[in-house]
């Protein structure tokens, strides 16, 4: 009786602890989800800041490229103007060359002595040509940087495509895991209900030994009374046999009393055997239910951990792909003429 009551108390405590653990696990899962959302939001903000810095650098390069391009165009226009002026001066010099022979020699010698040798570095045309050369080198460098950035953009787009494919696969796996978690939760709920029913049945069966003990006590008292009466009847029968002779009715009563005592003993043994068999069956069922409940709890925890990990990776990749899609299309360069 004490063992059955103690087992019932332990089972009730296990069920209460399981319900408390499930509530604690729900609270912990909620806290972990909030922490993951904050971490992902922080990552998204950092990625947006990095994207903005990249856009600012690209905008500065593009502005520098436009300035270099305008300077190059102005230098080319000025060089063309200088070439036209040089051609005009050549025509004038060709036209004036025959007239030089008619001038006095003293004037020609004085002009040749006073005329300084021109410095090519001070020539505006030479300076403009040098500027054009430098601008061409700068433009070539910018074009190389543009090609490198275009390659990086293609690589990023390819990486985004791969991330999207992985995200779709992980979303499918996440849906599968969610369905598995839901099924495990439903199964765990059913097993909890079954364990409660088994506990109730175990409690009812545990109360049966008390009834059995009461019945056994009544049976023992009744058997003792019958034994006393039987002894008294035997004594009286012996007296009657000695005095008057056998009495048929008394012998029949004694026989009925013996049969009743035997039937009560057999009924008691049968009832005790049946109760013990029911207790053994219920204990085995309860142990199997508890073991399967523990296995389901472990599977549920593993599935929830895997699901949370997939959610973290999937949401981070979605943020990465979205930010990259919003950042990269703004990068553009004007083609070089």
Image (tube, helix red, strand yellow):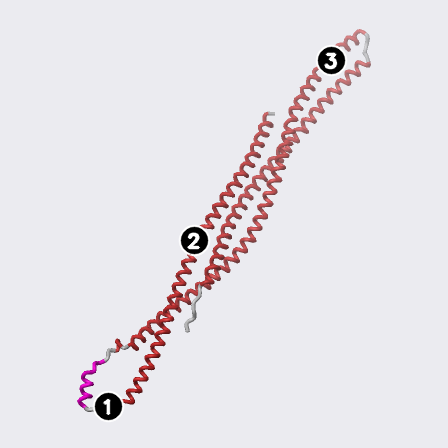
Of marks 3 and 1, which one's residue comes earlier in the chain?
Answer: 1
Residue sitting nearer the eye, 335 or 249: 335
Q: CA distance from mark 3 to mark 1?
A: 177 Å
Q: Name the residue located 69 percent from the left edge and 24 percent from the top edge.
A: 268
Q: Residues within 10 Å of mark 2 (few under 14, many from 20)?
A: few
Name the residue: 49% across, 54% down. 319
Q: Secondary structure at mark 3?
A: helix
Label 1 residue SS: helix
Q: Position of residue 215 (x, y in %)?
A: 68, 22
Instruction: Give x and y (percent) for residue 177.
Output: 56, 49
The earlier-in-sequence mark between 2 and 1 is 2
**Gap in angstroms between the C-alphas marked 2 and 1:** 79 Å
The residue pinned by badge 1 equals: 100
Q: Which residues are magenta?
A: 105-117
- Viewer-closest of 68 and 167: 68
Tell me the quadrant of the picture where the C terminus can be found.
bottom left
In the rendered image of this protein, does residue 110 appear above or below residue 215? below
The residue tagged 2 is 46
Which residue is depicted at the point 73% across and 20% down?
261
Magenta-colored stretch includes residue 108 = yes
In the image, taking residue 259 as reference, residue 87 lies left or right, namely left
| In the depicted structure, whether residue 139 falls above or below residue 257 | below
State the separation of the CA atoms marked 3 and 2. 100 Å
124 is within the stretch colored magenta: no
Residue under label 3: 229
Q: Check the picture and name the quadrant holding the N terminus.
A: top right
Seen from the viewer's position, the closer of residues 21 and 330 is 330
Horizontally, is 88 left or right of 194 in the view? Answer: left
75 in relation to 325, above or below: below
Which one is closest to the eye, mark 2 or mark 1? 1
């Amino acid at each position: 009786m004490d063992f059955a009551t103690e087992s019932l108390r332990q089972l009730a405590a296990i069920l209460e602890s399981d319900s408390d653990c499930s509530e604690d696990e729900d609270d912990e899962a909620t806290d972990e989800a909030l922490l993951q959302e904050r971490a992902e939001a922080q990552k998204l903000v950092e990625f947006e800041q990095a994207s903005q810095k990249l856009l600012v650098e690209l905008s500065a390069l593009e502005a520098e490229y436009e300035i270099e391009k305008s300077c190059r165009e102005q230098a080319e226009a000025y060089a063309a103007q200088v070439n036209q002026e040089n051609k005009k001066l050549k025509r004038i010099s060709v036209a004036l060359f025959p007239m030089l022979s008619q001038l006095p020699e003293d004037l020609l010698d004085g002009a040749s002595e006073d005329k300084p040798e021109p410095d090519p570095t001070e020539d505006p045309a030479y300076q403009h040509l040098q500027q054009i050369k430098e601008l061409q080198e700068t433009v070539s460098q910018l074009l190389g940087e543009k090609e490198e950035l275009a390659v990086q953009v293609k690589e990023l787009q390819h990486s985004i495509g791969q991330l999207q494919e992985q995200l779709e696969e992980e979303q499918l796996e996440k849906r599968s895991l969610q369905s598995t978690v839901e099924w495990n939760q439903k199964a765990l709920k059913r097993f909890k209900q079954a364990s409660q029913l088994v506990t109730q049945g175990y409690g009812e069966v545990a109360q049966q030994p008390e009834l059995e003990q009461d019945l056994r006590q009544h049976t023992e008292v009744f058997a003792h009374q019958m034994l006393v009466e039987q002894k008294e009847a035997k004594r009286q029968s012996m007296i009657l046999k000695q005095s008057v002779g056998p009495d048929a009715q008394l012998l029949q009563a004694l026989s009925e009393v013996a049969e009743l005592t035997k039937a009560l003993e057999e009924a008691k043994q049968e009832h005790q055997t049946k109760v013990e068999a029911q207790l053994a069956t219920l204990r085995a069922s309860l142990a199997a239910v508890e073991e399967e409940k523990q296995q389901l709890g472990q599977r549920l925890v593993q599935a929830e951990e895997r699901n949370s990990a997939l959610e973290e990776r999937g949401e981070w990749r979605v943020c990465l792909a979205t930010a990259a899609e919003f950042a990269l299309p703004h990068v553009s360069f004007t083609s070089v003429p």
